[in-house]
Structures are given as C-alpha cells and as structure tokens.
Image (tube, coloured by chain):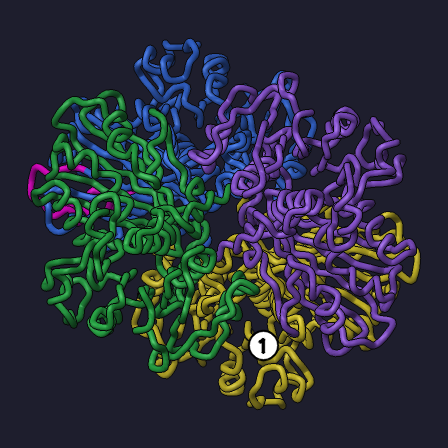
Chain colours: A yellow, B blue, C green, D purple
C-alpha cells in the first residue's frame, strides 16, 4: 500500500482519480486538497462517491502532502510547478495531470500558457508520461508529466507510422473530436447543456494549447520536426475522444500488421480487425485506446481512427498507469475496468 | 468458483450481465447462448468486451446448460418458463431477468403478457428477487424472479411507508422516468436517437405491464390491496430510473429517520441527507438505489425520490446480488463498482 | 407596424423574442438593450440571427424606449418593476417576461424573490397574461405579467377540471419536467452539458418560486384556495415542458369531451385524441400546448399530460400572443410556426 | 399557386418537406403518398403537423400525381427512376431527393447503389440541383436531382478553392460529421438512442455512397478529376452536418476575401468573419450554409469549416429552393426561417 495525495480534486480529472484510486488495491488516499471546498465532504460534492470515500477536502496549507509516496496534481495549469520542488525534495514522487511539465521548450510553453514558468530546471527531469513511448523512463521517474487528452489519442494513432518513417511528416492532419467533459467542470456558457447539446463545432483552429505538445511528441517519435494541422471539435457527448488522422503514405506496407505488431504487447492498446471503426463508447470509463487503420480506395492516404475516454486514458487512468509503473505494481492494476456499454 | 450460463445474451441486460460477471471473482462463465448470433464472438457484438471475454454465442441446442450451477435468463418474456423445469430438475438454479415468474396470479400474468403460462406450478416456488424484502428466501431459492426495473425503484421507494402503515394506500402515485435503454436493444422507431433525443413523453398511461407487478409487490408489503396510478415516461438518457412517488400521510412520523433506520443495513440502499435530491447519474453503472424523502410545506403529502440504474439494480446487478445470496458469497461481491460521474 | 423595444436581450427568452419578432409582419424592433453587451452586434452573440437582424445591443441609458409602442422585459427578476412606471407614464405598454408582476400578494412575492417590491401599486393593474383565462383583460391592458413556463403548462392542464369543480382541489399534484434552457443562459455548474446530460433529477421539492404563482392561478380558476404539491425536474433536453398532473375525481364526467369543448376555440391548445400521449418535440419551436386526458383503469384518479415549449408558449411566444391581443392583431400572427420534428 | 405532390412522405425528408411546403405561400399540397401508411392521417404520424395539414397518406396507385405541377420524391433510392418518365411525359416537373439522378456515370451508380438503373436516358437531362453551381440550368429543368446532404456541404466548402485552382486537387480531405437524422427514420440498431447517444464514430471509411457524388461534383467544378478522401462520422445530435475540409494551397491568395466575393450574392451562403467557427445549431431548421476559412499558423494547409442542416439545405430546403427557381418564385420564398437557437 502506498500513500497518495491529490491536489485539487474538485474537477473532472479529480473525481475520476478518486473513482479509480478508491478502488485501487495498493492505494491509500491520504488527502485531497481544495482551497475553495476545504471542509466539505468529498461525497457531498460528488454523490457517486457516497459510501466509498470518507475524506473531506482539506486546505492545502494544512495538508501534509510531504508524507505521501506520490502526489497527483489535478489542478489548473500553473499550480503544480509551484509545489513540485518542495515535494520532490521531501522524497515524494509527483504526477502532474496539468500541462506544467509537458513541454520542454520553456519559451514555447510560456507563449501558449501565458505565464512565466516557475521551475524550468525541473523540466529536464520531467518524464512525459506516455507509457507506450516512455515506459522504462517512467518506472524510475520522480516527476511525470501526464499527457493531455488530445495528445494521447493523436500520438498513439500516428506512432507506428512515424516510427517506421512511411509517411510524409510535413503534412499530418489530426481532426479530433472531444466530449464536453474535456472542457472541465468550471467551463462557461459554451459548455452549458443548452448550448453544447444537439450542436457540433470546431474551435481553436488558429491554434490550440495542445498543438505544441502534440508536435513535440510526434517530432520526438519521428526524430524530425513534423508539420501538423490540428483541428479540435466540441462534440455533444460527455466523455470520449475520437481522433481521425490523415497522412500521405510514402511506402507500401501492410498497415494493419504494422499496428498489430507494434501494439501486441501493449495492455491498453487494442487494434481492431481490418475494416473496423472504433466507437468512443467502447472505451467509456476504461483505460483502453482502440485503433483502426484504413487506406481508402487503396490510395496513398492513410486514415487512422483512434478512440479513448478523455478522462481515463486521456487523464486519470493514464496517471494511475504511470503510478503503477513508478511503484512496480502490475501496469493494469486498478484500471482494468470494462467500458460501460450502453 | 461457480459455473454460470446465460441464455440470450444479445440485449442490454445480457451485455450488462457479461460486464459484471466477467469481473466477478467467483464466477466462471461457461456459455452464453443466442439462437440468432450463434457462432459470433461476443466481443464482436459488444466491442467493450474485447480482450475481456473469449466466448462465442452458442446455439442453445448445443449448449450443456445443465452442467452449470446457475443459469441466468436474459431473454424476452416467455422463454425462461419453457426451459426452467428441465434445468431445475438437473439441479441448476435459475435466475430469470424477464417477467415469467414475477406475477403469482397466472390469469393476471396471461392478460398482460398475452400468452398462456407454460409452467404455472413453478410459480409457487419462484421467489421474487428483491433482496431488501426477500433476502432469506432468496438464499435458499432454486428459482428467482428478478424484478423489473420500474418495480424495483417504486417498491424500494414506498417500502418504509407501507411497512409502517402511515399512508393512504388507496391513492398511491408513481410518476417514473426511465432512460431509453429500458426499451431494449431491439426497439423500434420511437427509440431511435432522432426520435427520443431532445424529447420527453409519457407512455402506457392506460396500462403498463409493470403495473400488476408493482401492485402485487406493494400489496404484499402493505399486507392489503393497494391502489396505484403508475405513469412511466421515456427520458432522453441512456440509463437511469427516477421514481417520484406521492402518497397522503395518515400519521405524523419523522420520515427521514424512518428511511434511515429501515435501510441502515442495506448495502445498496443509500438514503440521502434530509432535503436531498438524488440524480440518476450518481448511480450510473452501479447497483445503488439512492433515496430522498420530502414533505413539502409540511403538508400531508409525502414525496419520495428514488433513483437506480435500470440495467444494474433494475436488472443485471440485482440478478448478481441474488446470485451472491444464493451461493453464499458476500452480497456485494463483484457489484460494488462506483458510479461513473460525469 | 408597431415600434417594439426589448430590455435585456442576451438570454434565451431574449433570443427567442428576437427570432419571433424579427419575422413578425407588424413589428419593427427599435432597440434591444443590454448593459453588459452594449455595442455588440446581436448577430455576433447569436449567429442564428446573422443576416436577419442588423441591430446592436444598446446601453439602456442611451435608448429611447419611451418612443416605443410596447416594451418587453426579458430581464432577470427585479428589473422591470423599476422601469415600468416611467414607460407606462410615457404611454408605452409593457410586457414583463420575468416575475415582477405575476403575484398579487406582495409579501408572498417578496418572500420568494428575496427583495422588496419596487412598485406594489402597479400590481393592481397588472394583468396575468394567460390568454386562455384573461383574453379580454389582456386586450386593454397597459401592463401584462407574462406567466412562467411551469405555471403555463400546469394551469392549462388543470383548467377545465377546476372550472367545472369535479376534482378534490386540496391534493393536486403537478409532476413537471423541464428542458435545461429553462434555467437560462447564465446558469452554473449543474446545467453544464457534462452534468445535465444523461442525467435526470428533481429539484426544489421543498419549494420553488413558481409554486406561489401556480397556486394563485389555480386558486383563481377554482375560486377557492387549492392545495398543490409541485415537483419540478431537470430533463436532458434543450427545450420542452412536460406536465404530468394528478387529481382525484369527485364527479363522473366525459373527461375527453370536457377538454375538447373547453379548448375548441383556443388557437394554441390542442387536445389529443383519447388515449394520446403528447411529446415535447411535437411543440418544439411552436406556441402550441398539446394536452391529453387519462383515467387509468377507470379509477378515481385523473391524469393530465400537457406539453409546451418553455421558450415559446412558456415565454416569448406567449408574450407575442399577448402583444397581438393588446394591439388588435390576429392572435396567431407571427407565432404560427410549425414545430421542428425531428 | 402551384400544385405539389410528394411521393413517400413518411421519412424525415418527407416530414421536413411537409413542414416547409405547408407554410409556403405559393404551394398547394395536393397529395402525399405512402404505400405503407395509406389512409393514415399525416398528422397522426407526425403530431407536429396537427392542425396544419389535413391530408391523409394516399396509395400511389390511386393518386393522380400527373395533375401536379411538380412532384417531389422523398423515397428510398430506386423509386423515382421508375416513375419519372411517366410524370415528365404528363408535363409534371420532378425533384428527386433520393440518389437516382445524381450520378451521370451509370455503371458507377449501379456499383454503389446495387441495382440496375431504370432510365439511364433521363440522366442526360437531369440537372444536379445545387443552385450555387447550376442556378440557370435549374430554372428551366424538368428533372432535378437534389444533392445529398454530405455532398452539399462538401461542395459548397471546396467550391471557391476549386474554381480558382489554388489547391492541390489530388489530395482533398473531407472529414464530415452528421447528425443521426441523416440515417433516416427506418434506421436500425446503430441509430437507437441507447447506441448513438453519448457516442461518436466514423463509418464507411472504405467507401460511402456519397463519395462518387462528391467526386463528380468537385471534379466538375475543378474541371479535372480530383482525388478525395471522405470520412463520414455519426454524431450524437439530431440535425446538422459539419464539414471540416483540408487542402494544400498552391498559391497565395486572400482566402477570406475569396469566399466573401464568391458568395456575396448567394442568399443562403453565409461566410463568417475571419477567425470564425460556425456551429451546426446556428443553421438548425434553416436553409443556410455557414462557412469559415482558416489557414492555421500561416502554413500551406487551408481548413474550411462548413455547416448545414442536413434535412434543410441538405435535403428538403434545397429541394424547395430548386422549386422556387423552377417556377420563378423568389429564391428564398418559404425557406427563410431563422434557425432555432438554443
């Protein structure tokens, strides 16, 4: 059993972490902090947890997070970077679900996130927590930057193509659709039910914060700077990411076999049979990423379809997968639930 | 470990049974039959189960269900009654999720279900599988009639009031709202997304098949014939039952204490703090029934709010709860998942 | 052509007024005010109006509303009562879509709305704008209090029963379900898509602001004080009110004929054939109220089903119906659109 | 006033035609046929039309469609081609909302639609009913092939780029999302609410029937054979098409000005201000197509966003727009309704 702390547990990644960690056999949740809701019972805010978690939100100032083995940050961007050094120095390992440690280029980060970075020196040791790419580094990491929801789906989708160098990397296209929970629990008018329901729209086409993260990840995989057009869309569903990825083939390979082979040992990547179309609900509430590969009309354009649950593999589930790796637990422990369908 | 068979697993109660049973530590699923889909992989029909269940649907004619310890019927009404005698004779216990054994009055059953009953003699020994009422009888039952989704919520809501005899039992009102999955996976035009979405309607006001089941249950609890107006409504959500129950009080008691005391030992009944309003998503995917009691403006009308997931406590979860009781497992084993919120 | 002003047009009743009035053949919209959005093009806030309305939101301080023939208040509660006297004195007629003039009992109003009333003297001449009850008074009114969405549906549903005195008026029950737009465009966390979608809940059971308005209306119709239990519910759809009403019959009449006769000349009340179940989408975007009457199992409980679009007959459409009456236009002018189905 | 007949009015394009035509000031609906529902009142099947249309569905065999000025086919594919010659010979003009006359290459049509074409000779005179391309031909056409919903959005989106020849036409990408009503009212399990709600998926990636129609249209506009990857997606909303289109620029032009100039005189095409993101609800129930143009990060990839209501501009509304052109009415007559928002 390890002692776990959560900083900032009132959002959707927070409640999802609680759902997963409270059922995890090796975890003892020590504290969950919230400046705003300090003193409120967690189960009052999230009635789904009634009878399952006895904790109250605690004031961060009165919470001994340095007694934990690991602390998750489920905070807005800019919080984790202020507290991580203290925790690391105390021997606590840190998993940040926000963006503070995802981008290695400090000036790029500051441009997109609109604030100075509080601890650029720690960026060097932060490991990008995509197990399918960085598994061994994660095992020994003190500080893990948990990937964003869009970046997870897009990187897992393009990965085998980029590793094998069989596509034109200058013109990658990622047309990605996200459920509304991706906007978080503090969202505004545009995520009201009466606005977002029975509606569909793109947003952030000129530029979205996940763009530099995705480009960095794809470029690392490809070992060269890639060109990417990334268009996110707001979809009237609660959970789910559906990435539709396009690239121009530069070589002729068995695409389905390529994906199956690359992911055969990955516990959470499921390559569908040839001709398949993954649907987001097939991973709702689960840590799976399901992928299908198509080459329509045998042309030179490859189409990848990849689905995840943005709150699980795209956030809390992947964070626990990273925790499992860091503490030597079985990688799937506590995150092997079956998706809820219908 | 017990050997479990499922008859008719292609509907929503079937896939939900599979989700629960495949994760149950004491269960070995031996077979799942489907005349129509025999030979198809279960995971092909339900991609959420990919990597979790290796079974194929088997032809009932070639399936040795009599080798099981228990068989679940997740079939349309009228199937279980034709096969139950054979199974019971073979020493197999039976849990029917359809309506074949729910109503003790054969002519009433035949009137509402439009067919002759195949084995009225077995009705006598069938136990109505509502653990909060019949726990001890369920433990030793060979044949359990798993309650309907509407009847479960309505009975659990009215139970403490009827047991204590503090309401006018001649004019009970049950205004109940159900998610669309309650209509099943074979439903027709009215349950299409483009028909049922962004829409709300009552149906079956002149009479619904669950009416006699609810009246029987409430009358048994009250120990007298009750009068009930039952109005079901189709609600644009996938899962969930919300029962809003009305009765006229004939005595002055602490209603909240009454409910808390009655349900204090029930593992799956959660009485909210006074003034609460349960929401269906707080039980989505879980076996809980959450209940709140109100007496608006201190008048003589009591209002009960009760929510369940129609596919879990209203069907598959309650069936497994019954199975746990029948085989001496802990009552919550394998059905203690936390609801998925958001 | 009349000159029309709208105060506070940035909410859902505002945009719905704009949709209707901009297509009304006898209306010239002079101004639409918004303190917060002054200077912004209406079509920028509501892209559905691009190419249809050239107006900008104007600062109320700079807007000559006293030059209008009629002014609609689509404001939060408490605004209209501060400006109405000035407008009436200037010869402008006023239709308030908020609650300022709906309740005749000032102390009751102040209790529920939590503020002192600014002009109790005007309450005397305010006409409650339910045309099916007050048509003749509305024609000559200077000040119309447009009914709330819940009160419209509940009163139209109970009306024929109360007028004829054939029910027990001490125990009326109104179980009403509303789409999320009823909470307005400024709503908070509970009306986010990720909270309200795939979810259903009651709220305000101990007491809701529409309760005194409904009781006042029903009591006026019945000519005696009625007893009412009112339970509103939040339903995962954008628009629509579904009222399910229950009462105990005290006389034996042909209920269907009663409703058909009462409403035969009402242009916006549609009594369904016997046995019908109205659905909210059948009135989506239209000014209709569709009603069905049931007497389940020929018992002594009558069940009324009534549906409206909360933004049309429950708000903006009814306001324009009142305007039509006040200015001698055909009652249906500009509000006879067909509901959008699917 | 012209006499209008509708063949096959029980689907979604049928009820939408009825909604529009019954409010059209120059139209007299003579008959609406349905083999299956003959004798049933139209308003019984579609309660939104109660009080608005007195017609019954009539048996095609007993319906004198040859007395009409124009007949709309809102039938499954393969019906119109069997009756069109008879009607044309009788002097009736025909607008087919199905696919029978959309594709000029007979063998291509037969491959995708799986049946022999009944009247290839009529294909020559059939005019593809996209007014923004073929306005003058439509005015004098006897036979109009109304475009499909996907093809309308994709062609209107790519049109200015192709006409000016400033993109690589070999690698066009159309990632298109459709509401569920696009699948029609007879759809199956995959379009049930409990399947399609809270879910998102691509389908038909290997090939979709609208692919050859789109390729033909784009190739005609470009005056050369284009290469196109078309991926349709099923989106949990009732109405709406959102096309996200990608192409590689081969010249440097002011893209926003290009679109504004091309569409400045088009009554139903609305080019958003630069940087805009159209949402489907902004055209819900209206005949508009709203378009935005982006060039992310000033790269060489252009991104076009185009939204329509699949049942209006994508079907019934465009059909009436074509009728208006054919009969010399104002092009917007009867189809200038404002979208319903929220």
Up the image or down, D171 lies above or below D99; here it is: below
Image quarter in which the N terminus of chain C is found: bottom left
Q: Is residue B214 magenta?
A: no
Q: Nearer the viewer, residue A152 or B207?
A: B207
B317 on left or right of A96: left
Residue D178 pos. (x, y %): 64, 49
Give the crowd class for mark 1: few <14, some 14-19, many >=20 residues within 10 Å. many
Up the image or down, B36 lies above or below A285; here it is: above
**Stretch of the chain drawn in magenta:** B247-266
Q: Which residue is mark 1?
A: A99
Residue A97 pos. (x, y %): 55, 72
- As helix, strand or loop, the secondary structure at mark 1 comes to loop
Q: Quadrant of residue D106?
A: top right
Residue A240 pos. (x, y %): 58, 56
Residue B142 pos. (x, y %): 40, 21
C70 on left or right of A8: left
Q: Quadrant of residue B108?
A: top left
Task: Confirm whether residue B220 shows in the render.
Answer: no
Q: Nearer the viewer, residue A188 or A215?
A: A188
């Amino acid at each position: 059993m390890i002692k776990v702390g959560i900083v900032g547990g009132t959002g959707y990644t927070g409640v999802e972490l609680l759902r997963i960690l409270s059922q995890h056999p090796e975890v003892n949740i020590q504290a969950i902090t919230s400046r705003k809701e300090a003193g409120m019972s967690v189960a009052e805010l999230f009635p789904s947890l009634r009878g399952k978690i006895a904790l109250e939100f605690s004031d961060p100032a009165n919470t001994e997070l340095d007694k934990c083995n690991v602390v998750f940050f489920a905070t807005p961007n800019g919080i984790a970077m202020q507290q991580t050094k203290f925790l690391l120095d105390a021997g606590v390992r840190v998993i940040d679900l926000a963006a503070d440690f995802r981008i290695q280029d400090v000036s790029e980060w500051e441009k997109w996130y609109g604030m100075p970075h509080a601890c650029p020196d720690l960026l060097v040791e932060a490991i990008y927590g995509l197990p399918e790419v960085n598994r061994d580094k994660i095992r020994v990491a003190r500080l893990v930057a948990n990937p964003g929801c869009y970046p997870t789906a897009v990187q897992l989708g393009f990965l085998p193509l980029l590793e094998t160098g069989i596509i034109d990397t200058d013109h990658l296209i990622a047309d990605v659709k996200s459920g509304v929970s991706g906007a978080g629990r503090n969202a505004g008018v545009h995520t009201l039910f009466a606005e977002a329901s029975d509606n569909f729209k793109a947003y952030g086409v000129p530029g979205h914060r996940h763009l530099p993260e995705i480009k960095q990840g794809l470029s690392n995989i490809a070992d060269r700077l890639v060109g990417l057009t990334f268009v996110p869309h707001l979809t009237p569903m609660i959970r789910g990411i559906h990435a539709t990825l396009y690239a121009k083939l530069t070589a002729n390979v068995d695409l389905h076999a390529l994906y199956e082979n690359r992911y055969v040992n990955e516990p959470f990547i499921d390559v569908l049979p040839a001709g398949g179309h993954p649907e987001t609900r097939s991973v709702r509430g689960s840590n799976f990423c399901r992928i299908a590969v198509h080459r329509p009309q045998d042309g030179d354009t490859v189409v990848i379809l990849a689905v995840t649950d943005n709150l699980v593999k795209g956030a809390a589930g992947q964070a626990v997968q990273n925790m499992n790796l860091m503490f030597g637990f079985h990688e799937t422990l506590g995150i092997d639930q079956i998706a809820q369908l219908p």
